[in-house]
Image (cartoon, rainbow, N blue to C red):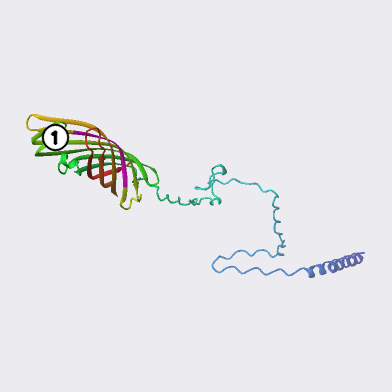
């Protein structure tokens, strides 16, 4: 009975070993433990065991882009173009932040200027020389005179204006003079003052302020003449008369920084009125003008 038990035990052990041994043969041999580093103290060896299984991780799938991405509002940069309602009226709008391209203004027309040399106010110092029969009464040259001219351009190089003047003649001589029905001989002191009041028209041959401006003119209007004759200490004769007169003129204006230098020669002629003879004299004028 004991013998039978040993046989059974041996058979069972043989079957168990034959079943376990192939499984042990298929297992890989354990990897040797790595040697410890020289600088570090010896550490306890890790227990041998199978390596951990490796698992491949798939890359994340790209996110799908939505059909209508959300819009974000960025602040406008400094100097950006204005809104549509305030956009610059040009064919091509400037880029944001760029300065708009401005075209230069057109050049002024040739006769457009801040200064108008044909519209002026002139003041002259006037001298005069009588001619013809006027010299008999007026005597010699006159150094006392003043003329005021005002002109305004109306079209092209044509200007209209007015002229006011005063000229005084004085003469003393020993002579015989007949005034009306009276003949007087003695030392005579003669004085005559004229006051031309004329409407004028002037034409300038140029209106370029960079050079001289020659001109011609004509005055038409009234002339007041006042005469005084003293013969000796007791006899005095006076006469005042109005005359229709003409005054052609030639001259030149030389523009400067704030105005013009004016040089002109004018011939005054007053027609005979009643018993008073006509009057003729040349004016030589030098003065200055301020642009109107």
In terms of secondary structure, what is the magenta stretch mainly?
Answer: strand
Between residue 139 and residue 103, name the one nearer to us.
Answer: 139
Place residue 134 in its image quadrant.
Answer: top left
Q: Is residue 158 shown to the viewer in this render?
A: yes
For label 1, count other residues whose C-alpha is less than 10 Å away and answer few (under 14), some (14-19) or many (20+): few
Seen at 17% across and 42% down, the residue is: 135
Q: Position of residue 244 (x, y in %)?
A: 28, 36
Quarter of the picture containing the N terminus is bottom right
Question: Which residue matches tag 1?
Answer: 178
Place residue 276 in its image quadrant.
Answer: top left
Q: Where is residue 140 in the image (x, y as percent from the top left)?
A: 15, 43
Residue 221, above or below 71: above
Residue 143, above or below 32: above
Residue 149, above or below 17: above
Q: Position of residue 67 (x, y in %)?
A: 70, 50
Q: Is residue 258 shown to the viewer in this render?
A: no
Between residue 257 and residue 268, name the one nearer to us.
Answer: 268
Number of marks in picture: 1
Place residue 245 in its image quadrant.
Answer: top left
Residue 90 falls inside the magenta stretch: no
- Residue at far front of view: 181
Could you tell me which secondary element the residue under label 1 belongs to?
Answer: strand
Range drawn in magenta: 216-226
Q: Where is residue 263 in the image (x, y as percent from the top left)?
A: 25, 47
Residue 217 falls inside the magenta stretch: yes
Between residue 183 and residue 106, name the one nearer to us.
Answer: 183
Residue 257 horizontal side relative to residue 66, left or right = left
Residue 194, above or below 203: above
């Amino acid at each position: 009975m004991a013998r039978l038990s040993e046989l059974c035990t041996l058979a069972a052990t043989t079957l168990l070993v034959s079943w376990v041994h192939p499984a042990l043969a298929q297992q890989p041999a354990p990897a040797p433990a790595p040697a410890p580093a020289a600088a570090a103290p010896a550490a306890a060896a890790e227990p041998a065991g199978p390596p951990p299984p490796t698992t491949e991780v798939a890359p994340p799938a790209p996110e799908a882009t939505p059909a209508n991405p959300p819009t974000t509002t960025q602040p406008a940069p400094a100097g950006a173009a204005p809104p549509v309602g305030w956009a610059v009226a040009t064919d091509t709008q400037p880029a944001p932040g760029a300065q708009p391209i401005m075209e230069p203004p057109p050049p002024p027309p040739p006769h457009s200027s801040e200064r108008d040399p044909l519209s002026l106010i002139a003041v002259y110092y006037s001298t005069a020389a009588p001619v013809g029969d006027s010299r008999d009464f007026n005597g010699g040259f006159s150094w006392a005179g003043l003329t005021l001219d005002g002109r305004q351009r109306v079209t092209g190089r044509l200007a209209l204006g007015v002229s006011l003047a005063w000229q005084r003649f004085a003469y003393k001589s020993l002579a015989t003079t007949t005034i009306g029905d009276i003949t007087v001989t003695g030392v005579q002191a003669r004085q005559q003052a004229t006051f031309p009041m004329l409407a004028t028209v002037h034409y300038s041959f140029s209106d370029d302020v960079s050079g001289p401006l020659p001109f011609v003119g004509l005055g038409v209007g009234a002339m007041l003449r006042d005469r005084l004759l003293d013969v000796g200490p007791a006899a005095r004769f006076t006469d005042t008369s109005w005359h229709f007169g003409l005054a052609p003129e030639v001259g030149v204006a030389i523009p400067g920084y704030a105005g013009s230098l004016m040089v002109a020669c004018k011939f005054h002629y007053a027609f005979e009125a009643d018993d008073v003879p006509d009057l003729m004299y040349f004016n030589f004028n030098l003065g200055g003008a301020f642009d109107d």
